[in-house]
Amino acid sequence: MMKVASVVGARPNFVKLAPVSRELKRRFDEVIIHTGQHYNYEMDRVFFDDMGIPSPNYHLGVGSAGHGHQTGEMLSKLEEILLDEKPDAVLVFGDTNTTLAGALAAAKLHIPVVHLEAGLRSFNRRMPEEINRVLVDHCSDLLLCPTDTAVKNLAREGIIRGVVLTGDVMVDAQRECSIIAGKRSQIMSDLGLEPRRYKLATIHRAENTDDAERLAGIVKALEEMGDVVFPCHPRAEKYIKNLGLWDDLCRRVRVIKPVGYLDMIMLEKNAAKILTDSGGVQKEAYLLGVACITLRNETEWVETVQDGWNVLAGADPEEILRLAKSFEPGTEKRDVFGSGDASLRTAEAIAEMLGWQSRGGS
């Protein structure tokens, strides 16, 4: 049986892995490699527990570090494992440092690289995630695109070969997990929340956390907004404390620890509005039919904005507050992210690629 190595390391990777892994195991011997990019229970193990993902075969324990150091350490350790395991393909997810390290390690060993969520572009090269997306796409053999826009982005960069429109595996994951969350999650009662009576906020991207002016502006807006629930990413907590804003924030905003995916779905589903800089949360808000205010100046999920369910607020506190009060979706949602069979299409595309290569394709 052919072998596929799935390389994951951060929350968005885990969410996408869950439905894909089940399809892969029907066709391949799957090896799961966890780099340890997210390394505490709230950001890591809880996703495997909640979503029924098999325990990783390898855990590299890399943890937090600067981009270069973190990516380099992952690359070195991944190379050793890939040399030992000799997979027929390496599957990487999204746009994290784990994604880049997995793709580079495989490409340098001449192992076919499969990029799930290929073709996304914010066109902001100051974002580490944008650099990761571009580099991974240009060294991948099979590029699995969630939307037509992603396919067109790749074509503009001259990438046509190996491009497959699969739809978005987040649709698969969310449909399944929404049902489970409704039965298992107690987050609403635990926090004493009523549906549509609070706003949900998340912040984690470096463009916001590492920029004192932007972070202070976002924090100010959240404090003045009222009725905000804020599952606080460790990165955001660190920088908010560094600015001396933590105590005031906790007095005015419902700050909680990061939550598992099932609890997050329930918080998103029942929120009046969502404020976030997360690409995944923007998309989840769209799929759940909740208005989203994106705390960035651009987004890779342009379909959510075009459909009128997402709006870009940047980090200006006055603009954030204005949109939090006034923004309402103005259109019906479309199935721009597929119909919920992206995981099946992913496994089939990998099987077709490997079958074609085994017959002498190049």
Image: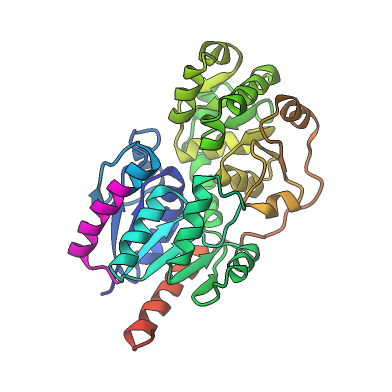
- Residue 222 found in image quarter: top right
**Does residue 51 lie above or below 319 as drawn?**
below
Asked whether, in this view, residue 88 is left or right of residue 124, the answer is left
Most extreme residue toward the bottom, as rendered?
Answer: 359
| Residue lying at 36% horizontally and 82% vertically, measured from the top left | 357
- Residue 91 found in image quarter: bottom left
Which sits in the foreground, 274 or 361? Answer: 361
Which sits in the foreground, 17 or 204? Answer: 204
| Residue lying at 45% horizontally and 74% vertically, measured from the top left | 349
- Image coords of residue 359 (percent x, y): 34, 88
- Image coords of residue 334 (percent x, y): 72, 58
Asked whether, in this view, residue 298 is left or right of residue 112, the answer is right
| Residue lying at 37% horizontally and 60% vertically, measured from the top left | 103
Asked whether, in this view, residue 88 is left or right of residue 328, the answer is left
| Residue lying at 40% horizontally and 65% vertically, measured from the top left | 23
Span highlighted in magenta in the image: 72-88
Asked whether, in this view, residue 81 is left or right of residue 173, the answer is left
Q: How is the image coloured?
A: rainbow
In this orientation, does residue 103 appear? Answer: yes
Which sits in the foreground, 204 or 196? Answer: 204
- Image coords of residue 231 (percent x, y): 51, 28
- Which quarter of the rendered picture does the N terminus lie within? bottom left
Tell whether position 249 is magenta: no
Most extreme residue toward the left, as rendered?
Answer: 84
Tell whether position 86 is magenta: yes
Q: Main secondary structure of the magenta part?
A: helix
- Which quarter of the rendered picture does the C terminus lie within? bottom left
**Does residue 74 lie above or below 324 as drawn?**
below
In this orientation, does residue 94 appear? Answer: no
